[in-house]
Image (cartoon, rainbow, N blue to C red):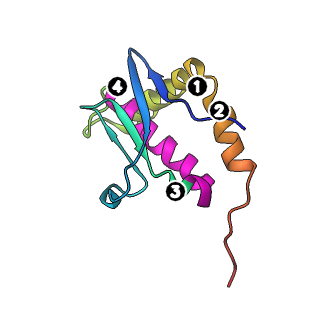
Amino acid sequence: MNKIPIVLKIAAFDITVEDLPHGDELNGWGDFSALHQRIRLDKTSLQKLPRKYADSFLHETLHAVCWVYGVQDEDKEERVVTTIATGLAQVFRDNPEVLPWIEEKLNGCHEGYSNG
């Protein structure tokens, strides 16, 4: 079984990946703190909804990429997309365990949704 990295290298920064404490529901599935240089994820979703956990990991990683690479609200779409693509390519290159972990979570499980 592949594991999520405890430290995610994004450019010159080491972003820690931690469990979201119980009782911190206001943050939903996870959060990114630039101040603390950390991503926190709701670990209960790892067992129940592994695809959502992988989605949340990518979501918070993109927040970190945007912060590290200086994406601003007023930036044009092409700059934002280019920056995110470059940032993700760098994250995947410098953290080789990330892609196998995401693939395992997205393809290696069947989440229990019913059609009614």
Residue type at mark 1?
Phe
Cα distance between the residues tagged 3 and 1:
25 Å
Front residue of 79/116: it is: 116
Label 4: few (<14), some (14–19) or many (≥20) C-alpha neighbours in 10 Å: some
The stretch in magenta equals: 46-68
Q: Does the image show residue 49?
A: no
Q: Comparing marks 3 and 4, which lies closer to the viewer?
A: 3
| Mark drawn on residue 44 | 3
x, y percent for residue 58: 51, 41
Q: Main secondary structure of the magenta part?
A: helix
Residue 90 left/right relative to 13:
right
Sequence-first tag of 1 and 2: 1
Q: From the image, tell me which residue sits under label 4.
A: 68
Tell me if residue 66 comes above or below residue 41 in the rendering: above
The N terminus is located in which quarter? top right
**Quadrant of residue 63 within the rendered picture:** top left
* Residue under pointer 1: 92
Residue bearing the label numbered 2: 99
Q: Are marks 4 and 1 in contact (CB under 8 Å)?
A: no
Determine the CA span between mark 2 and mark 3: 21 Å
Image coordinates for residue 30, horizontal then vertical, percent: 40, 49
- In the depicted structure, whether residue 45 falls above or below residue 33: below
Q: Amino acid at mark 3?
A: Thr
108 lies above or below 16: below
Determine the residue positioned at 59% across, 19% down: 93
Q: Earlier in the sequence, mark 4 or mark 2?
A: 4
Q: CA distance from mark 1 to mark 2?
A: 7 Å
The earlier-in-sequence mark between 3 and 1 is 3
